[in-house]
Image (tube, grey):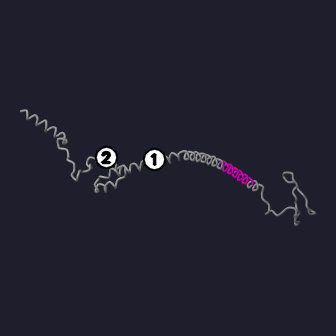
Amino acid sequence: MDIGQTTVPADDGTPTPVTPAGAKNTDTPPAEHMVPKSRFDEVNAKLKQLETQAADADKVRVKADRETAERNGEWQKLADQRAARIAELEPVYADATSKLQRYEAALNSQLAALRKDVPKHVVALLDKLDVAEQLEWLAANREQLKPHVDGVPSTPKPAGGMDAQQQEAARQVSANFYRDF
């Protein structure tokens, strides 16, 4: 303290330096560099609030990371189950594929045998169908596609529905019937 400076008790009992008029007080900094206590408390409270928010945000982030890891663990578990199921089904798929190829070859050979006697104009239409549809069509139209003997189509059934043998038998019965009279 400078010589000639005295202290006066403040309201709270702490000594406060008093500078005589015209003397410089070298112990206290100028007033513009001091922060009022209320402002300091306000900034300090805001800082504590921000620290609390940051801690809460960290807790939320840690919880989200944990939940994500758990979900990823479940996905990993599910992926492992799927991989095991795929490994289990691969031999079945390979067997089914080989059977499919055998069945397809058998159907194609059967189709080729059925198409052998089909007229060319019908073959052109059959080519537009898949194998199963061709087989169905050929089975449904088998009677109309019977091969002709020596280029002559087979005799159609008469309107009465009797074939040649039945007609011959009916003529013999009729002839025998009239001969007896």
Position of residue 111 measured from the top left corner of the image (x, y, whole percent): 35, 50
Asked if residue 77 is positioned above or below residue 30 in the image, the reply reads above
Q: Residue furthest left?
A: 181
Quadrant where the image shows the C terminus: top left
For numbered disc 1, what is the local secondary structure? helix
Please report the residue visible at 51 percent of the width from the left and 45 percent of the height from the top: 92
In the drawing, does residue 148 fall left or right of residue 69? left
| Mark 2 element type | helix
> Which SS does the magenta portion mostly show?
helix
Residue pictured at 54% horizontal, 47% vertical: 86
Q: Are marks 2 and 1 in contact (CB under 8 Å)?
A: no
Q: Quick one: label 2 or label 1, which is nearer the N terminus? A: 1
124 or 59, nearer to the observer? 124
The amino acid on which the numbered mark 2 sits, given as a three-letter code, is: Ala
Which one is nearer the viewer's eye here, 105 or 7?
105
Whole-angstrom CA distance, mark 2 to mark 1, is 24 Å
Q: Quadrant of the N terminus?
A: bottom right
The magenta stretch spans residue 62:
yes
> Which residues make up the magenta segment?
44-63
Q: Residue at x 55, y 44 (%)?
A: 88
Residue 119 percent location from the top left of the image: 28, 54
Amino acid beneath label 1: Lys
Q: Residue 131: horizontal and vertical position, in percent? A: 37, 51
Q: Is residue 166 left or right of residue 126?
A: left
Q: Position of residue 95 (x, y in %)?
A: 49, 46
The residue under label 1 is 99
Which residue ends up furthest to the right in the rendered image?
A: 3
Pointer 2 residue:
139
